[in-house]
Amino acid sequence: MEGIHTYRELKPNKLTQRLLDSIRSELNLFPSSEEFQKVLAKKKNENQHSTAFCLYMTNVCQSAFYYNRENAQKGSYTIDIGVYKGANLIFVIEAKVLPTPKGTKQHPRNEHEYVYGKGAGIQRFKDGNHGVDNIDSPFDDSGMIAFIKENDFTFWHEKVNTWILDAKCKESEQLQAIKIDSTASFLSAHPRKDGSMIRLHHFWVKV
């Protein structure tokens, strides 16, 4: 418990902090942006939301950072968004829609997919399959973005923290609120299978 708490208190490096500040400051205008309106004009699935977000943030950042869709991770895994500074992958983001789409009869999806289960976000970081650079070196910090279609941020904060306990994770792994306003940001820290820690920065926006 002490180690996890201390890890949460550590600050990301300056470049990562610049990136995090940029996302927090620009996210509220994303749903009204030209990128959002045009990319999501017809299909409104998770992939299209992620594509629109990548275009929006790359354009807003004016080349300070480049947001890439479907970046390689460990083995055959890919993550929804990779963020580059020049040629260097510096951050990765897993995207989810809340509530989780039901899927199909052949491929149903679990409502708690943000946290655990097949294709789960937090679980993939804990397993070590997500949260690495292009040579599989682990990041201290990675991210998740949720595109919220129903209910408010407080509802989903409580729901996600309940799922974390349902997954038999420690209470210390629950999301801590950083800001809840027109958008929301949270922080959590999790042990990986290899014993190292990963800090996750959660960005939520209503769409």
Image (cartoon, helix red, strand yellow):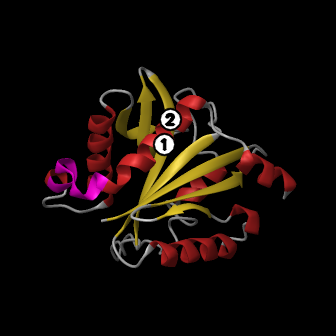
Residue in the picture at 62% in, 72% down: 161
Magenta span contains residue 103: no
Q: Quadrant of residue 41?
A: bottom left
Q: Label 1 vs label 2: CA separation?
A: 5 Å
Q: Is residue 170 visible?
A: no
Location of residue 112 in the rendering, given as x and y in whole percent from the top left corner: 52, 72
Figure check: 78 above or below 188: above
Residue at (36%, 36%) from the top-left corner? 67
Image quadrant containing the C terminus: bottom left
Q: How far from the left and from the top, in percent, is residue 176?
A: 63, 63
Q: Is residue 145 left or right of residue 68?
A: right
Q: Give the numbered dot on residue 21.
A: 1
Q: Which disc is residue 18 wearing?
A: 2
Element under label 1?
Answer: helix
Identify which residue, 22 or 101, lies in the foreground. 22
Specify the farthest residue to the top. 87
- Structural crowding at the residue carrying mark 2, measured as other residues with C-alpha within 10 Å and reported as few (<14), some (14–19) or many (≥20): few
Q: Which residues are magenta?
A: 29-37
* Kind of residue indicated by mark 2: Arg
Other residues around mark 1 within 10 Å, as few (<14) / some (14–19) / many (≥20): few
Image vertical order of residue 133 relative to residue 189, above or below? above
Q: In the image, is 54 to the left or to the right of 77?
A: left
Q: Are marks 1 and 2 in contact (CB under 8 Å)?
A: yes
Q: Quadrant of the N terminus?
A: bottom right
Q: Nearer the viewer, residue 205 or 41?
A: 205
Left or right of 160, for residue 196: right
Mark 1 is on which residue type?
Asp
Q: Quadrant of residue 104?
A: bottom left
Residue at 56% in and 71% down? 160
* Element at label 2: helix
